[in-house]
Image: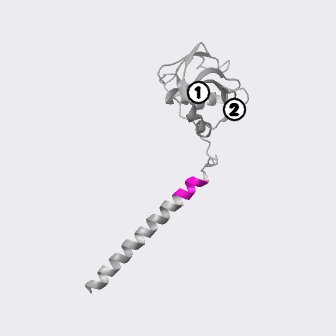
Amino acid sequence: MTTCALEVPVEDFEHLPRELGCSLHRHGEHLTLACEQPGCEVHFEVEGEVAYLCAIELKDDPQGRFFRDVVGLLMQLYEGDLEAQMRWSPESPDDGRIEVRNGETSHPVLLESPEEPQDAAPLPVDVSMPMVEQWLADAEAAWAEYQRHKQSREKQSQSLT
């Protein structure tokens, strides 16, 4: 990586790991997004309420998935800038310079859509109990209102006959 500029609000790290399929590790003022594949990590330094990209590690990244699905998506979402020289494999036609400006690029690896295997299991949904309880309370209130309107219509129908 020759240059990079990416700012992410620290509060976004509450949901980013789940959305990107990564794990988040915090050591003091240093945040790391990592995937299951060893050697694929994105490092940030925290200053106040903002985390600044300081390093990207890519080793053994099959088909550039981590680069595309994590690094590329972060660059796009937060309108980051990146200049890097990549070498995917000795035979790869996509080796070379990668430039991202304000989250936009023409590099073929970053233009591909993330692939989902046909037999992939759905990702588990992380929903907190207070949120579920609120949904349940809202549903019960809506049901009670429906019942009141239904009874009111039935009474009006009976009074007309």
Q: Quadrant of residue 18?
A: top right
Looking at the rendered structure, the secondary structure element under dot 1 is helix
Extreme-right residue of the structure:
38
Viewer-closest of 6 and 96: 6
* Disc 2 target residue: 25
User: Residue drawn 48% across and 19% down?
Assistant: 101
Viewer-closest of 82 and 160: 160
Crowd tier of the residue under label 1, counting other residues whose Cα lies within 10 Å: few below 14, some 14–19, many 20 or above: many
User: Residue drawn 69% across and 32% down?
Assistant: 25
Q: Quadrant of residue 142?
A: bottom left
Horizontal and vertical percent position of residue 154: 34, 79
Q: What is the magenta range?
A: 129-134
Q: Earlier in the sequence, mark 2 or mark 1?
A: 2
Question: Image quadrant for the N terminus?
Answer: top right
Horizontal and vertical percent position of residue 153: 33, 76
Looking at the rendered structure, the secondary structure element under dot 2 is strand
Marks 2, 1: nearer the viewer: 2
* Disc 1 target residue: 71
